[in-house]
Image (tube, helix red, strand yellow):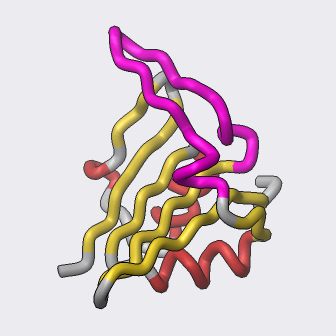
Amino acid sequence: MRGRFWVKVFRRGGHVLVAICDEELIGKTLRDEGMNVEVRRSFYGGRNLGLDDTIKALKEGTVVNLMGNEIVSVALRLRLVHPEAIVKIANVAHAQIVHL
């Protein structure tokens, strides 16, 4: 694991949305069964962080959007994501976390 990620934090009211993607995915379009998912810099491209700072941001979010095999694996290891909550888009893992 290289451990570099793009992390962007959005704050609105009492909510914190954290968008994280694996470093190499930024700017790519994932195509799978008639679906196109753009990993946009405008959504994910806040700061390029190492693993420790990314984990801090991941734990801060009330809503978290994860795109990439590496970051989803990190969330699994931390028990923040259930394996059944992971979807694959063009063999790339995607998961969302919502704290109510």
Question: Total label count?
Answer: 0
Q: Quadrant of the C terminus?
A: bottom left
Does residue 73 appear anywhere in the picture? no
Between residues 35 and 1, which one lies in front from this camera angle? Answer: 35
Looking at the rendering, which quadrant does residue 52 occupy?
bottom right
Residue at the (67%, 41%) spot, across then down = 26
Task: Tell me if residue 38 is in the magenta stretch.
Answer: yes
Q: Nearer the viewer, residue 92 or 84?
A: 92
Looking at the picture, tell me which residue is in the foreground, 83 or 99.
99
Judge whether 70 appears above or below 24 on screen. below
Looking at the rendering, the stretch of residues picked out in magenta corresponds to 23-45
Q: Residue 56: x percent and y percent?
A: 60, 84
Is 91 contained in the magenta span? no
Q: Is residue 70 left or right of residue 51?
A: left
Measuring 73% from the left and 49% from the top, which residue is drawn there?
23
Q: Residue at x 65, y 73 (%)?
A: 54
Residue, far left: 100
Residue 13 location (% of width, % of height): 30, 87
Residue name at image x 51 percent, y 27 percent: 91
Q: Position of residue 1 (x, y in %)?
A: 77, 54
**Residue farthest toward the bottom in the current orientation of the protein:** 14
Q: Is residue 45 left or right of residue 36?
A: right
Q: Is residue 64 left or right of residue 85?
A: right
Is 75 rendered above or below residue 16? above
Residue 78 visible (yes or no): yes
Report which quarter residue 53 is drawn in.
bottom right
